[in-house]
Image (spheres, rainbow, N blue to C red):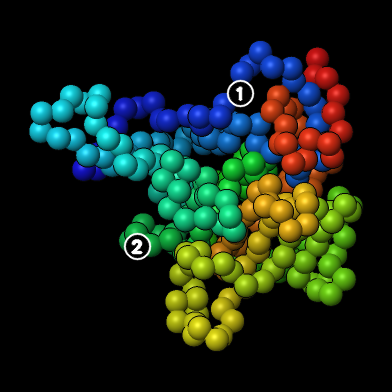
Amino acid sequence: MEAPLNPNPPRDASTPNRAQPAYWVGPRHLAGDDGRLYDTVADTLADLGWTSLAIVRGRQEPDEAPEDRQVLRSTVLHMSPDTLRWAQWTLADEPFRLGELPIAWQVSAREDVTTPLAQWSAYFTPDVPGEVLVDFLLALDARDQPTTGFTRPELVLDAVTAHGWLRDVDQPDAGATDPTFTSHLSLGEVPPLIQDADPHALTVEADEAGPAGWQAWAEPVLGAPCLWAVSFSASVPHDIVAAFAASLSSTAPVLRRVLPESTRDRLLRAPAG
């Protein structure tokens, strides 16, 4: 069964207790999402005039009370007014994982309303700083045409090096890292299942390299699970990725009540207020 549900979409179950002390922390790329990744993004999209729809897939026996229905999968879809761009909260579904982390938000765009297929998609796991995803969405919303890109990939690297990140020694034109070598940004092979309408991405052979897309991740301990990961399909315009990169590498502190365990000791913090 699949049906629209109530107008109140499911909130992130990890939303922190507001009684916890708040801190201004940095660097931003290691600050996590404060347990509010859904709220932060959904509130921004509502302010932009995007509409939302909660969809639940479940099973209900004939004599079973509605409150006893078994929910199998649920998503929340946010659609822009022109219907050319959308963001889907998929954490409850966990349709697939990026690295070892579940996908939380999937953002997509199409060329025109005559096709239901996305031209490109971007994927964000939990603990991506909410401010960074919001800045990416603001850049996407501000575009008249969300799929056409004329800028070069250097724009993305310029955005992070302007904030002190270092270009990759081996691939200076395709990668950068923060000064502590914890967070990374790279233009290269796209992971499996990343949706993109580029014909080359659809026809690439098993032994052939497909179109390159931007990937970003934070690995606080070498060889340990990542804190977060992001994947942009090959057709995402570079200027929108640059907005993400500039926000990710920003030196401005962010407000947090919940700090990631893996980066807690790396964060500079000052009491808020």
Q: Quadrant of residue 241?
A: bottom right
* Closer to the camera in the image, 248 or 144: 248
What residue lies at 78% left-to-right and 24% top-to-bottom? 23
Which quadrant of the view contains residue 19? top right
Please tell me how crowded label 2 is: few (under 14), some (14-19), or many (20+) other residues with Cα within 10 Å: few
- Element under disc 2: loop
x and y, in percent, of residue 64 in the image: 15, 28
Q: Would you place residue 103 above or below residue 23 in this image?
A: below
Q: Tell me: residue 138, above or below residue 194.
A: above
Q: Earlier in the sequence, mark 2 or mark 1?
A: 1
| Residue lying at 51% horizontally and 31% vertically, measured from the top left | 12
Q: What residue sits right under mark 2 in the picture?
A: 115
The image position of residue 69, as x and y in percent, is 24, 31
State whether residue 190 appears in this view: yes
Local secondary structure at mark 1: loop
| Residue 260 sits in quarter | top right
- Residue position marked by numbered label 1 in the rendering: 16
Q: Residue 123 placed where, x, y %? A: 55, 54
Pick the residue in front: 43 or 130. 130
Q: Which mark is residue 90?
A: none
